[in-house]
Image: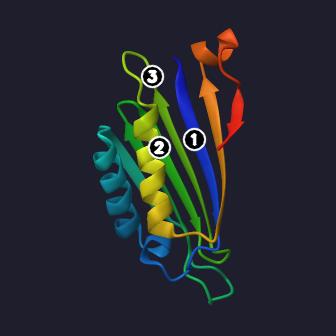
Amino acid sequence: MQGLHLTADLRGCAPTLPAMTEPQVLRAACRAAVEAAGLRAVGEVFHQFEPLPDGQHAPGITGVVLLAESHLAVHTWPELGAVTVDVYVCNVGADHSARAEVVLGGLLQLFAPASVERHRLWRGALADSGAVARTQPA
């Protein structure tokens, strides 16, 4: 069950960026990032929330792409100019760590945040053996 789990908190994203508020745009971007990385999508769900009471911001989106190798999850908050991204890949049979980095890199390029807080979590056998630190800042 060993694998790499990348997380990124993006701030300072343009709230008017279509991927922040249009589920089909975010879906296409996520699928493109997965394809570019050579990972295999096996399912997906993209949900747009109800309009915000302030009437000034479009509602955000939660999107998940289920991968044969694990998952990609993206959550947008246009009212905050923020996005969170999780990419987790299992490395049983092959090391997909570099592919996870490609997925995250594609989404960072898409959202062009002013700041990013990234974390790397090694999960499973490598983490349990003590060979790799459980968490590492990126």
Which amino acid type is marked by label 2? Glu
Residue corresponding to mark 1: 6
**Cβ–Cβ below 8 Å for labels 1 and 2?**
yes
Contact (CB < 8 A) between labels 2 and 3? Answer: no
Q: Which residue position is annotated with label 2?
A: 101
Q: Where residue 118 appears, x then y in whole percent?
A: 65, 49
Q: Residue at x 34, y 47 (%)?
A: 34
Disc 1 to disc 2, how far (Cα)?
8 Å
Query: What kind of element bears circle 3?
Result: loop
32, above or below 4, in the image? below
Colouring chosen for the image of the structure: rainbow
Circle 3 packing at 10 Å, graded few (<14), some (14-19), many (20+), is some
Residue 4 pos. (x, y %): 54, 31
Residue sitting at x 71%, y 26%: 134
Return the disc, 1 or 2, that comes first in the chain's sequence.
1
The residue carrying mark 3 is 91
Helix, strand or loop at disc 1? Answer: strand
The quadrant of the image that shows the C terminus is: top right
Q: Secondary structure at mark 2?
A: helix
- Tell me what residue is drawn at x 47 percent, y 78 percent: 17
Residue 22 in the image: state x and y as whole percent: 42, 73
Instruction: Say which amino acid is labelled 3.
Output: Asn
Q: Earlier in the sequence, mark 2 or mark 3?
A: 3
Q: Is residue 23 left or right of residue 121?
A: left
Residue 105 shown left or right of residue 60 in the figure = left
* Residue neighbourhood size for the residue with mark 1, other residues' Cα within 10 Å, grouped as few (<14), some (14–19), many (≥20): many
Outermost top residue: 129
In front of the other: 114 or 25: 114
Q: Give the amino acid at mark 1.
A: Leu
Nearer to us of marks 2 and 3 is 2
